[in-house]
Image (cartoon, grey):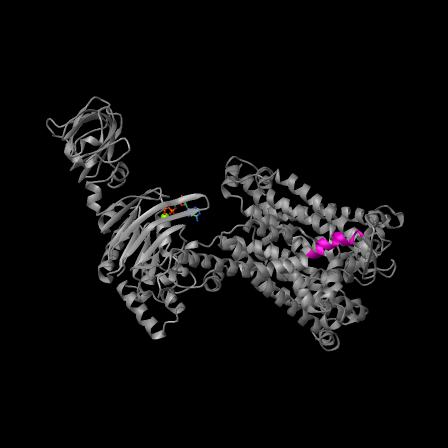
Amino acid sequence: MTAMTDADFRRAIRARTLRRNLWLAFLLLPPMAVMFIFIFLPMGSAVLYSVYEWDGLVRGDFVGLENFREVLFEPQKSKFLFNAFKNNVIVFVSVMVVQNGLALVLAMLLAREPKGYRFYQVVFFLPVILSTVIIGFQWKLFLNPVFGLVNNLLRAAGLDSWALPWLGLPETALPSMILVNAWHWVGFPTLVFLAAIHRIPKDYIEAARLDGASEWRIARDIIWPLMAPAVTIIVVLTFIGAFNWFEIPYVMNGLEGAPGYSTDMLGLLFYRTAFGSISATDSDFGAGSALAVLIFLFIFTVSLIFTRLLTAREIELA
Amino acid sequence: MQTAKQKNSSLDRVLIQIFLIGNAIIMLYPILMMALSGFKTNAEIFTRPFGMPSSFNLDNFKVIWTQTDVPRYLINSAIVTGFSVLFLLVMGTMAAYALSRYRWRGSIMVSLFFLSGLMLPLRLAIIPLFIQLKAMGLTDNPLGLIAIYTAMSLPATVFILTGFLRSLPAELEDSARIDGASELRIMVQIMTPLISPALVIAGIYNAVPIWNDFFFPLIFIQSPEWKTLAQGLTQFFGEYSINYGVLYAGLTLAALPIVVIFIAQSRRFIAGMTAGAIK
Amino acid sequence: MAHIVMRDVQKRFGNVEVIPGASLEIKDNEFVVFVGPSGCGKSTLLRLLAGLEDLTAGAIEIDGERVDHLSPSRRGLAMVFQSYALYPHMTVRENMSYALRVARTPKAEVEAKVREAAEILQLTEYLDRKPKALSGGQRQRVAIGRAIVRDPKVFLFDEPLSNLDAKLRVQMRIEITKLHRRLKATMIYVTHDQIEAMTMADKIVVLNEGRIEQMGAPLDLYNDPDNKFVAGFIGSPAMNFFDGTVTARDDAALTVELSDKTKVVYPCANPGQAGVGDAVTLGVRPENFHFDGGDEPAIKGEVYAVERLGGETYLYLQSTAGHETVVHAVGDHEVAVGDQVAVNFNPARNHLFDPQGRTIR
Ligand SMILES: Nc1ncnc2c1ncn2[C@@H]1O[C@H](COP(=O)(O)OP(=O)(O)OP(=O)(O)O)[C@@H](O)[C@H]1O
Ligand SMILES: [Mg+2]
């Protein structure tokens, strides 16, 4: 073996570094490539597509903001947009109050570890793992005006006049669907809140109890402020979920938001615009992409604002 | 004073139990009714909606098993979910490992690359995605779904796994290096086995929504050959729209696999599915 | 069986220079201990030698061959970590045999080596347990066993005993020393523990801010430190320092006046190292004080704490020379807090440091 020079050793060490970098590239390139091709590329393209005219699958001329103008200001189209938007807002507010409010109460109660609290956790979470499609169909059957479980129960209780065609009336269709959604998801915020409460050091709660605080005061003054991070996450997730709401309305009342667009949602409108439907016109990728960009910007901005506002409330545990 | 308080708290306890039991009934009763109705004939559903089925005969289930595509949908869903979870765990581990176990310039940028994926709602990019998958020959193809699910799940997976991998001591790695193990061997034989609980959590976190997903198959799969369960159910509902017993049986069958696994592994499921929302 | 040379080894992490340049020679079969304050680069130096970090500059040779470009496993050394770093999901047997299995050693040979190491370390009955089911001392032994099976030329230990309780530490200290004699391998050992350093080492290397301050046999460092840093670092409790000024100089001694005007005549061979008027530091070890020194110089002060251990007594003085002073006395000494005492010392047995901190000899 010939003697190696100092430069040879430097080179040998550099080769080691190079090998390490190749190894890192091997680890990172496949996942990054998948993410790029199937997420970043389409997301970027969505913005690009919204400024073109489309004829079916074929891209036409550059039309600037024309597609946006169309969906926002042409009354024939914008009335759908604003109607759907209004419905999404109703969904968000109702879900916050009904579903997350109930979840908060359930979590506070479960946090006191009543008898059977493991059982309750499993039961409340059970619907969460089921497909929205299963839940939607199941409740569509239950809400059937003639033989559905709900009306059968009402009649059995002597409330015959209450036995309404729940999904068929504009006033009751959306509330019914919101309740179904709450039934489906309530276990999720419940257990997230519960986990957050369990992470609050027991000392704080015991100290308050020694100070003579009632359970209600403890919940309000100790637990509620200290579980702020979980509240932030649930509010933001609820918001994103409400404005992406698609499966329940699709399965239960169809693409057109029946009856009479009373359950129309941005998600349904987007789908109809992009891919066409029986009633609406042909598929229009330009207008669809413009809608997508608008919805994304709205969700993104409001989520950011929510996060900002709510994290300001969060307290670092010492 | 003391006794008054005691009495009060035991009353509290009774009220809490009533409230919780009421809730549990509301959660369980519909699922139970769905399962029971699956054993009933149409006539029974109309005449005795609340009663037990006259017999637990499996006729409705037989219809589903022999005359519908539901078994095929089940298999398709299993294939799509299985491969998606496999790929997303492998790739997620690879990326998380590179980000958590080595120090290198640009690692923060790459972390942000993955994290930003958490905030992009891919559904809104469905149009370009559709055009793109069509051009790649991935529509009507389970590979297309697998690719999308893998990509969508990577950000959260990388996020969850990075946290766990970071907590492993560096000395283990050093020790294995001195023992002569290659970097690949260290990752596969030493470090990854130590985060297997995290892999289970990440797996469940992603598997449940993938198994249940309806939106992407709705857009990308047309031929019955590759329809998944959630999507296939809509088809099935169209075909059997008046045979309610069969419909209930179909729903029950569709729900069965995941419910069974959930009941066996409820704690892991709950930990897994809430993993993204708990800091 | 290895002769190690580190030549002007340097290490930077980004812009932080952790080892500005260290040269060191370790003889075959030597037991070398690295000591130094926390963060001074002991672990880094060990890791450079092991190949877990790449050198910024310099060279490392083992038995005359450059190794600094080799991966850790090809340098023929083994390392035992403070946290033991046992693979939690493997049994003791799997842990100990891992390196051999990676190297595709024949099964029979692996088995024989593991059995031999397990016998040396009294681990035979635990071979099928997982690390979780072992006590701290047993885990430590497994970590050592894992090193032994590889027949390394060099053993590296990074504070291997600091997670053990005092009694086990003494026991393991003795076992490692025995092991050294038995295996006749070169061992490099990092510790914070004075007793480990003094009792185990053939040679101690004192590090400070990435620099080697001094190396030598334990008692040489104790009796004849090169500088104030080493003097203060070796010995427990640490040496007392008193600020003073040189007031006179002749051929064989310097006269130093402490802040309370106590005059000390310090005999030395090179008084020229300091001039009259220089600020110097006098160092006196706690064990060099005594109570019946006649006309020897004395440190006076008020006792503010006493620790009476039966066999020995420690007095803590607020001395008039301006410092808190620790005094070690043999036996049970009758003093109480608040007493005024004067303790004598023999100037010839103490140390004087010039303004740069170098020992005046
Ligand atoms: N990978 C690294 N990147 C940057 N700085 C480092 C790195 N490793 C060590 N250092 C720094 O190098 C210095 C020396 O660290 P080292 O671990 O060698 O000290 P040590 O003498 O072993 O200390 P201790 O007695 O506490 O174990 C420290 O200031 C440390 O912060
Ligand atoms: Mg160290």
**Is C207 inside the magenta-drawn segment?**
no
Please indicate whether residue A40 sits to the left or right of residue C283 in the image. Answer: right
Q: Is residue A250 above or below residue A84?
A: below
Viewer-proximal residue, B26 or B71? B71
Residue C237 seen in render = no
**Is A43 inside the magenta-drawn segment?**
yes
Give residue B263's quadrant in the image: bottom right
What span is colored magenta in the figure? A41-51
Task: Give the x, y percent position of residue C59.
Answer: 35, 53
Which residue is outermost to the right? Answer: A76
Quadrant of the drawing holding the N terminus of chain C: bottom left
Residue C244 seen in render = yes
Viewer-proximal residue, B99 or B163? B99
Please indicate whether residue C170 sits to the left or right of residue B84 in the image. Answer: left
Task: Give the x, y percent position of residue A126.
Answer: 64, 59
Viewer-proximal residue, B82 or A159? B82
- The majority secondary structure of the magenta stretch comes to helix
The residue under the point 53% across, 50% down is B105
Q: How many marks?
A: 0
The residue under the point 79% across, 71% down is B42
Please indicate whether residue A149 sits to the left or right of residue C238 in the image. Answer: right
Task: Give the x, y percent position of residue A238.
Answer: 69, 49
Please indicate whether residue C315 sits to the left or right of residue A80 in the image. Answer: left
Which residue is outermost to the left? Answer: C294
Task: Give the x, y percent position of residue B183.
Answer: 46, 61
